[in-house]
Image (tube, grey):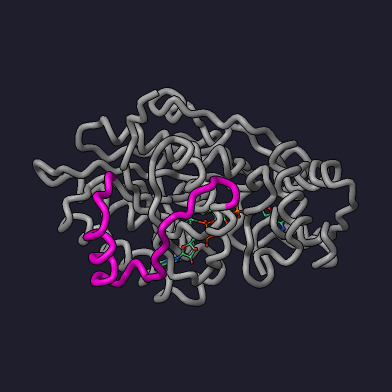
Amino acid sequence: MVNTNAQKFVLVTGGAGYIGTHTCIELLAAGYQPVVVDNLCNSREISLDRVAAISGVKIPFYSLDVGNAEALREVFSRYDFVGVLHFAGLKAVGESVTQPLRYYQNNVAATLVLAQVMQECGVERLIFSSSATVYGDPASVPISEDFPTSTTNPYGASKLMVEDILRDVCKVPNSGWKVCLLRYFNPVGAHISGLIGEDPSGTPNNLMPYVSQVAVGKLKQLGVFGDDYDTIDGTGVRDYIHVVDLAIGHVKALDKLMTEQPCCLTYNLGTGSGYSVLQMVKAFEQAAGVCVPYKVMPRRAGDIAQCYADPVMARDELGWTAELGLERMVADSWRWQSNNPKGYE
Ligand code: NAD
Ligand code: UFG
């Protein structure tokens, strides 16, 4: 069979991280050739060795900061990129509140540098990692892409600012830009091989890595942030999406941009189903065959009761739907965590 994607180089910023590594595998499977740049501020190069072990392909890697225009230009001069998947970013909500300048510099200013270099080099296809956090506290669920946006912390604001910037870039008359803003809901799970997964530094902020680390004995017990929300069991409800489904969503988005006229498209990447904290804990316990002790704590500041996607637009326009259910999410999280109790260390 003819490989119609031959020599389709794709720049993957932040490609050594959690979602980036999984997306590299799906890009390779679809015939694209990822090239990774990452400053390793929240990842390790060994993650790309693991990607090579899974895929049989050693992805070219450049250790650089996306805010470094000179270093980026050098990479752009080596490859004829068809597009860029921009994962590089800092993502800890609490940290963004105490270090706003660092977050705006890294997530907004560095993205401006990337976009400028792309424009200079005539590469105008970009997929940006946005977040459901841009919906703030939604008036209702499920959340569709036309819901109003608002943010409550610098991390969320940095995502919305970049969305606004990219929308403006696409509005320029005769702009050649083809941009896709992907709003992720809650990515969880890991590659089925158990070789790559989420490896947070320090104590995890997010539910699933915390649960996994309790299950593996690294942490003592889970704090459940509030059991008095207006939800099925009082605990917060989220739209957990398997990271492999999320990765495939990026390939579908890139495929679309390959044939699209200049545009700025926005899609939710979620499953459309919500699970509560306690439902997640129970499912994890069943998959892992271990007990996850927990204690109910006060609500976490800034949390909302429930958040889940209306995923219909991605289905209709990208031909993408999440396929992997809760059992796979928790089983794969556990395989990764139990095979790698210290992450990539
Ligand atoms: P991650 O931290 O595992 O990956 C991000 C990668 O980017 C890391 O490898 C890090 O070293 C790199 N990086 C950060 N700043 C950089 C810079 N200036 N230059 C070069 N490399 C840099 O995080 P992830 O979970 O894979 O998230 C990827 C993207 O998706 C992020 O932009 C994040 O904000 C967004 N997102 C994540 C979630 C989530 O829950 N994981 C939800 C919504 C959106
Ligand atoms: N939770 C706990 N205990 C914990 C951690 C979380 O009970 O130790 C609860 C939270 O209160 C919430 C649910 O588990 O009800 C999920 O919390 P996460 O921190 O895993 O995820 P969030 O929905 O708060 O936020 C995540 C990312 C954000 C992103 C958002 C939407 O952290 O960056 O999803 O995509 F913006």
Specify the quadrant that holds the N terminus: top left
Identify the image quadrant of residue 183.
top left
Which residue is the extreme one toward the left? 173
Q: Ligand 2, what quadrant?
A: bottom right
Any part of residue 74 in sight = yes
Q: Nearer the viewer, residue 233 or 280?
A: 280
Q: In this picture, which residue range is highlighted in magenta? A: 53-82
Magenta-colored stretch includes residue 248: no
The relative height of residue 255 versus residue 16 in the rendered view (above or below) is: above
Using the image, determine if residue 175 lies above or below residue 117: above
Image position, residue 87 (x, y; %): 43, 55
Q: Nearer the viewer, residue 305 or 201?
A: 201
Say whether residue 332 is left or right of residue 241: right
Could you tell whether 178 is left or right of 276 in the image?
left
x, y percentage for residue 273? 63, 33
Measured as percent of width and height from the top left, residue 217 is found at: 85, 64
Residue drawn at (51%, 45%), measured in percent from left and top? 25
- Screen quadrant of the C terminus: bottom right
